[in-house]
Structures are given as C-alpha cells and as structure tokens.
Image (cartoon, helix red, strand yellow):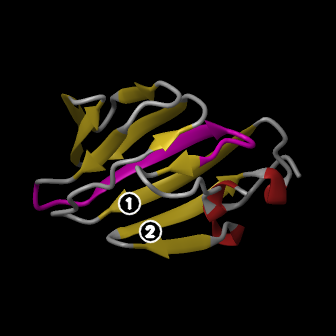
Amino acid sequence: MPLIKSADAPTFAGPRMIAVGLAAPSRGSTENSVWRFTLEPGSAGHQHAVSREEIFIALSGSARATIAGEVHDFRAGDALVVPADTLFDLAVPGDEPFEAVAILPVGAFAQSPGQDPISPPWAQ
C-alpha cells in the first residue's frame, strides 16, 4: 500500500514516549521502517544501540543526543545519523515535548546493554 494515512497508523505508548508507526512491513514497506514519535519533557533517555544505521529528523522542540559518549544538541530542522551498533540515547531536558521522525532499515533490532535484542513494534 503506497499511502499510509496518519489516521490509520497504529500508535504505541512507551515510557515517556508515544510512537506512530508510519511505514513498516505490516503496512507494505519492504526496505525501511518510519515512525513519528514524541518524547515528553524531562525524559532522561534510554541507552541502546540499533543493528543498522538509524536516522532522526527533528520536527519540533529540542533534545540532547548522546552518541558513543559524545553529546549533541538536536533541534527542530536538524537531522541526526546514528551509526549501527553504537550506544546512544535521546533525552529531553527542557520543558517542551520533542517530536521527530525516525527511519530504520527493515529487519534491524535494538538492544540495551545487558538485554536481549528486540524489534520495536512500531517498526514491524
């Protein structure tokens, strides 16, 4: 299906986050998964790595990305490229929500230190 309408996209709630699944295998995509997500203000972030390069495009607000120990301020209009197998997190230290779009190749998985790998439900 070439058009995934926002009203038809599934919504997933996580700790201090809402994700809207846009393109994914369950919605007809074969190459990439794409989702829009919002992180609540004050979110401390969740350290993890993904098995493939992940790209984020900030839509509104600002966040602090820590990638392999290096801190980057990330604001609306910016793009962030996280290399595969690199620990990172996104925190929202301010008092406004942060909204972004993420793109991850189909079949990629996420893994937190000491945990089993998972496939995020919004990317399936």
The type of residue carrying mark 2 is: Ile
Q: Residue 49: x and y, percent?
A: 46, 40
Q: Disc 2 designates what residue?
A: 18
Along the polypeptide, which appears first: circle 1 or circle 2?
2
Q: Is residue 88 left or right of residue 42?
A: right
Q: Residue 88: x and y, percent?
A: 34, 39
**In this view, which residue lies farthest toward the left?**
94
Residue extent of the magenta highlight: 94-109
Q: Are marks 1 and 2 in contact (CB under 8 Å)?
A: yes
Q: Is residue 55 left or right of residue 113?
A: right
Q: Residue 53: x and y, percent?
A: 55, 28
> Does the magenta run of residues contain 100?
yes
Q: Residue 41: x and y, percent?
A: 19, 63
- Asked where in the image residue 40 lies, by quadrant, the reply is bottom left
Depth check: 12 or 46 in front? Answer: 46
- Residue beneath the point at 62% across and 47% down: 109
- Asked where in the image residue 29 lies, by quadrant, the reply is top right
Mark 1 nearby-residue class (10 Å; few <14, some 14–19, many ≥20)? some
Residue 42 position (above or below residue 81): below
The type of residue carrying mark 1 is: Thr
Under circle 1, the secondary element is strand
- Which disc number belongs to residue 38? 1
- Asked where in the image residue 121 lies, by quadrant, the reply is bottom right
Residue 44 position (above or below residue 66): below
- Residue beneath the point at 53% across and 28% down: 84
**In this view, which residue lies farthest toward the front?**
114
- Residue beneath the point at 59% across and 53% down: 117
Mark 2 nearby-residue class (10 Å; few <14, some 14–19, many ≥20)? some
- Residue beneath the point at 32% across and 45% down: 89
- Which disc number belongs to residue 2? none
Q: CA distance from mark 1 to mark 2?
A: 5 Å
